[in-house]
């Protein structure tokens, strides 16, 4: 694959990532063909609290992931909103002295934990990944899914809310692939074994 496919597919870590709380592994790409092609637009809210809240959740994405156009990672811990309060409206913003949420004035900010995407994960068109979710190696998320629960290795999930559809392979093959960890090979070894990697897992 070329560095820019259809002028919209990019290797994410070769471009400027707006938030210091986003970490992306090698060869993970975003194919934003229908949504402008800017991966930063996939990460909601996190950049807005970067300077104010230091101890916040992070988005960590592994190597060789395929992120389709319009995917959204919901981050930021729902700053200012708490549905356990009498009102979910962020009334702080109406105070005359309010100048934004800071480390000392977090409003209803609640950490959800880091959002962690494993290696060789395929996230389909316009899917939404909610805060604090872990998606394990080799998983596939169907288009327009809303992921609210952790996803296991080599599982296929879809729907709103997303549910397990099936596993990609037998458990024996999954265990073998997790042990293999081909995504940690150097590029030369990957290319040498490309025909085996681009073949049915039997």
Image (cartoon, rainbow, N blue to C red):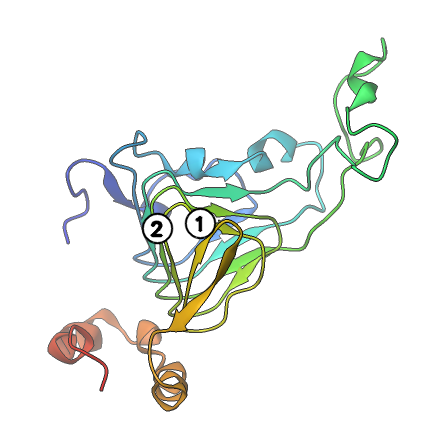
Select label 1 or label 2 by which is in front.
Answer: 1
The extreme top residue here reads 96
Question: What number is the disc on residue 145?
Answer: 1
Q: Helix, strand, or loop for circle 1?
A: loop
Q: Residues within 10 Å of mark 2 (few under 14, many from 20)?
A: many
Q: Position of residue 33 (x, y in %)?
A: 24, 36
**Image quarter of residue 37:** top left
- Tell me the residue that label 2 is attached to: 124
Expressed as whole percent of the image width and height from the top left, the position of residue 43 reads 49, 39
Q: Do the residues bearing badges 1 and 2 touch, measured as CB atoms within 8 Å? A: yes
In the rendered view of the protein, which quadrant contains the C terminus? Answer: bottom left
Is 162 displayed left or right of 33 in the figure?
right
Between 144 and 17, the residue placed more toward the observer is 144
Displayed quadrant of residue 65: bottom left
Judged left or right of residue 149, residue 25 is left
Q: Secondary structure at mark 2?
A: loop
Q: Residues within 10 Å of mark 1 (few under 14, many from 20)?
A: many
* 20 versus 98 height, above or below: below
187 or 148: nearer the viewer: 148
């Amino acid at each position: 694959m070329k560095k820019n496919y259809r002028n919209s597919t990019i290797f994410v870590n070769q471009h400027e990532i707006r938030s210091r709380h986003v970490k992306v592994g090698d060869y993970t790409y975003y194919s934003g063909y229908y949504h402008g092609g800017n991966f930063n637009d996939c990460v909601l809210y996190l950049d807005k609290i970067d300077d104010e809240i230091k101890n916040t959740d992070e988005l960590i994405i592994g190597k060789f992931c395929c992120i389709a156009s319009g995917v959204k990672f919901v981050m930021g811990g729902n700053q200012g909103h708490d549905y356990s309060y009498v009102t979910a409206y962020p009334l702080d913003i109406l105070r005359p002295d309010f100048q934004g949420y800071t480390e000392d004035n977090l409003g209803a900010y609640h950490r959800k934990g880091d959002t962690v995407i494993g290696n060789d994960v395929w996230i389909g068109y316009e899917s939404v990944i909610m805060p604090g979710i872990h998606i394990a190696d080799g998983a596939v998320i169907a288009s327009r899914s809303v992921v609210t629960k952790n996803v296991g290795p080599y599982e296929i999930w879809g729907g709103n809310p997303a549910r397990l559809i099936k596993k990609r392979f037998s458990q024996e093959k999954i265990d073998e692939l997790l042990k293999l960890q081909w995504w940690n090979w150097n590029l030369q070894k990957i290319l040498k074994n490309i025909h085996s990697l681009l073949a049915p897992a039997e």
